[in-house]
Image (cartoon, rainbow, N blue to C red):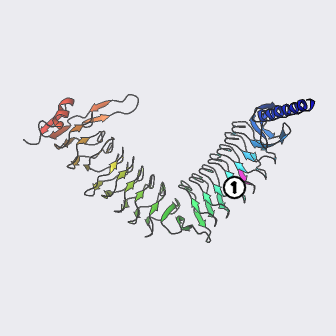
Amino acid sequence: MKKLMALLTACAVLLSAGAYSASALDENVTDGDYVYKLVEDGAEVVQYNGSKEELVIPDTFGGKPVVSIGKKAFRSADVVKVTVPKTVKRFCDHAFSDCRELKQINLPEGLEVIESFALHRTKITKLNFPDSLKEIGGGAFEESFKIKSVKFGKGLKRIPKGAFDLTAIKSVTIPDNIEHIGTGAFSECKSLTTVKIGKGVSSIGYEVFSWNKKLSKLTVDKRNKYFVSEGNVLYNKKKTRLIYYSLNRKNKSFTAPKSLKKLDGGVFRGNQYIEKVTLTDKIKKIPYDAFYGAAKLKKINLPKSLEVIEGSAFRDCRINSVKIPKNVKKIGYCAFSYSKIKKLEFEKGARPEIDEEAFSGNDFTEVTYLPFDCGNYRFTECRKLRKVNFTSDVTYIYNDFINSGLKEITIPDTVKVITDHALGFEEHFGLDGGYTKIKDFVIKGSKGSVAETYANEYGIKFVDVNK
């Protein structure tokens, strides 16, 4: 009996010890200026409450090695210099983000992971990644405007989305161990002049180097099996995808290689030199922002293969005339807005879905109105517009001509619905809002039609076309 009692007592002690150990994990403990918790392989700094400008993070808490800097642990701290112990393996999300005065931090050998936005918005000037580093999270160093140089270690394989967006990096050498460069990884690096892509890169996201006005030299290792650069134009190896076109390239024209099937989003965005672009009949989509702000672009062929023109694709260009091919199914928001288009045509049979403001702010005097399912403002702010032609299948008129140059319009009998204030009004946007009737506006149509009903409702002059 005594042996049985002793055995039960021992079990109880072991169970209570196990319960204590389990409960001790993840419990916050305060130690001076720090709050920490025990994790499976050591201790994690949860929060720093001190005010030191130069800080040496302890290498142990609770008798355990510090292995992790926790989520937001030092966020917005007024530190200038931080020494991280060699025991640390991970910087968690936002660990040092918004440390606006942080100029220097060591990345110790043994560090394996830097999570998303871990060093977002700091004043760090250079980065030397240890060979132990295996993973960087998206936007890890984004908006750290002072970073001028980065040296990659041998353990890293992926540069994630937005990792170095809006930094001051001047030159980038992508080593052979890197396999992937994420979308926008080096976008808007206004000091970036040189990029060297190593042989190991097999995947590149969108707009990786966009808005880098000083980038004048982009090369790819000749041993790379997946990508090639020619005259600061980056393609995949087969030249079916156009990835990057340098803003520093001063050529006035670009003729796509016959193999080209795809343009990346924003590929010509902000280009101040290009005037003429010739695309292949293999292109099915003009992606978002593809030519946005290409202020001198006057001429481009829209191939018969084209099916989609995405939002802002040609916004703020200077295209003289546009003819939409009949295979186009979709034209996105602001796709051609404010591009000084003088002539707009739709190929016979074309019936694309057209989003709001797709052709707003242009200079054409005449336009063809197609049947639409919904939406407004497709031709708003077209101040030179004087004539609208309707296809025979139009039954609905939306608020597409608000604030245009129309003074009169002839409406066919096929039209069954005209939305409120669609014709004969200027719309005022902003807090006050509201509408103002256009003086001497004229609506023409058949007597007894929807056109006459609308005109009478709003006190607009109506003219019977059959008299």
Q: Using the rendered view, name the quadrant where residue 194 is placed.
A: bottom right
Where is the N terminus found, in terms of image quarters? top right
User: In the rendered view, would you say 296 is above or below 139?
Assistant: below
Q: Using the rendered view, name the quadrant where residue 130 is placed.
A: bottom right
Element at label 1? strand
Residue 436: x and y in percent read 28, 31
Is any atom of residue 366 visible in this view? no
User: Which residue is denoted by mark 1 in the rendering?
Assistant: 150
User: In the rendered view, would you say 226 is above or below 328?
Assistant: below
Residue at the outermost top position: 432
Dot 1 alpha-carbon crowd within 10 angstroms: few under 14, some 14 to 19, many 20 or more:
some
The residue under the point 69% across, 48% down is 114
The residue under the point 72% across, 39% down is 70
Q: How many numbered markers are drawn?
A: 1
Q: Which residues are magenta?
A: 121-131
Where is the C terminus found, in terms of image quarters? top left
Residue 264: x and y in percent read 48, 58
Q: Is residue 409 magenta?
A: no
Left/right of residue 223 with respect to residue 87 in the rendered view: left
Question: What residue type is disc 1 on?
Answer: Val
Main SS type for the magenta part?
Answer: loop
Left/right of residue 417 with respect to residue 136 in the rendered view: left
